[in-house]
Amino acid sequence: MFKIITQTNDFVIVSKNANVNFHDEGDHGTGLFSQVKNHLLLQHDINELYPVHRLDKMTSGLLIFAKSKSSAKIFGELFHHHQVEKYYLAISDKKPAKKQGLIKGDMAKSRRGMFKLLRTTDNPAITQFFSHNIGNKQRLYLLKPHSGKTHQLRVALSSIGAPILGDPLYETKLNDEQSTIKDRGYLHAYALRFVFLEKEYEFITPPSEGAYYLSEEVKVKLAEITKPWLLKWPKLK
């Protein structure tokens, strides 16, 4: 379900597998949070554990857990003020009108548990992106959200006509030629960057699951963007 990336006295960084629910699913199994907590309790590494953000079930990648109430409060403030930089990787078989840009708009509930992007910007979801050709009629998207809305990145790419491959909600038109290899939803929390108690932390974990993510073309592209915060991101408007 997960891999421990690092631990400090204050927090734990975990890389979550795809198709793992964050919370327990009753008869369907124990969720990620319980699994991580039980693992660390058995290792005598913690007395308690506090989630400070979450990932959708289909999404793999980096997550932070606080090891005390005081640490959780600090992270709460960091997230509230958008001081935790998050970077994601996604794959779509659709090409956007521009290779880079800004997706901005309010989000509203739609049908079947979905959300949609609106033209209004009263309390908008904001996402910057780059897209790269990786062959096989596919694009690798590097995404930087500036808000934390439910399904934000999935809705953002869907709104520009490039739904994420394997997304059970937003990729409504499946490509029969590629359906046999859609082994997961192709969204991955790739990197985190933040300052905690005056110390700067950077974490980068490439995806380890999914045939498309493990292709040579993606590996070559990721070798060029090892530190995504150094890129010249599209301007925020």
Image (cartoon, rainbow, N blue to C red):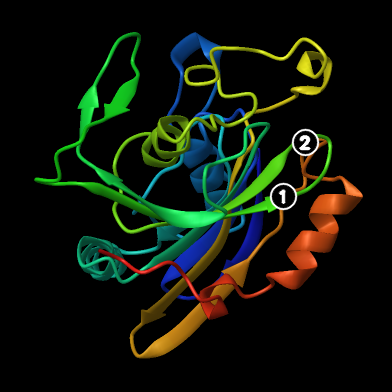
Q: The C terminus lies in which quarter of the figure?
A: bottom left
**Residue 70 sits above or below residue 49 on the image:** below
Q: Mark 1 points at which residue?
A: 207
- Whether residue 232 is visible here, answered yes or no, is yes
Image location (x, y in percent) of residue 181: 82, 22
Disc 2, SS: loop
Where on the picture, by quarter, is residue 82?
bottom left
In the picture shown, does residue 19 fall above or below 101? above
Alpha carbon separation for disc pair 1 and 2: 8 Å
Q: Which residue is drawn at 58% across and 32% down?
A: 164
Relative to 198, say whether 19 is above or below.
above
Rendering coords of residue 211 (x, y %)? 83, 35
- Residue at which label 2 appears: 210
Q: Residue furthest right?
A: 216
Q: Nearer the viewer, residue 17 or 221?
A: 221
Tag 1 secondary structure: loop
Depth check: give the residue in front, 108 or 96. Answer: 96
Q: Taking the image as drawn, is residue 129 in sight?
A: no
State the image coordinates of residue 117 (x, y, percent, origin top left): 28, 32
Q: Does the residue at mark 1 contact the one at mark 2 (Cβ under 8 Å)?
A: yes
Question: Three-letter amino acid code at disc 2?
Answer: Gly
Residue 183's label in the rendered image is none
Q: Residues within 10 Å of mark 1 (few under 14, many from 20)?
A: many
Residue at the farthest bottom position: 198
Q: In this view, does 222 lie above or below 207?
A: below
- With 157 as the anchor, is 44 left or right in this view? right
Q: Is residue 76 left or right of residue 213?
A: left
Quarter in which the N terminus is drawn: top right
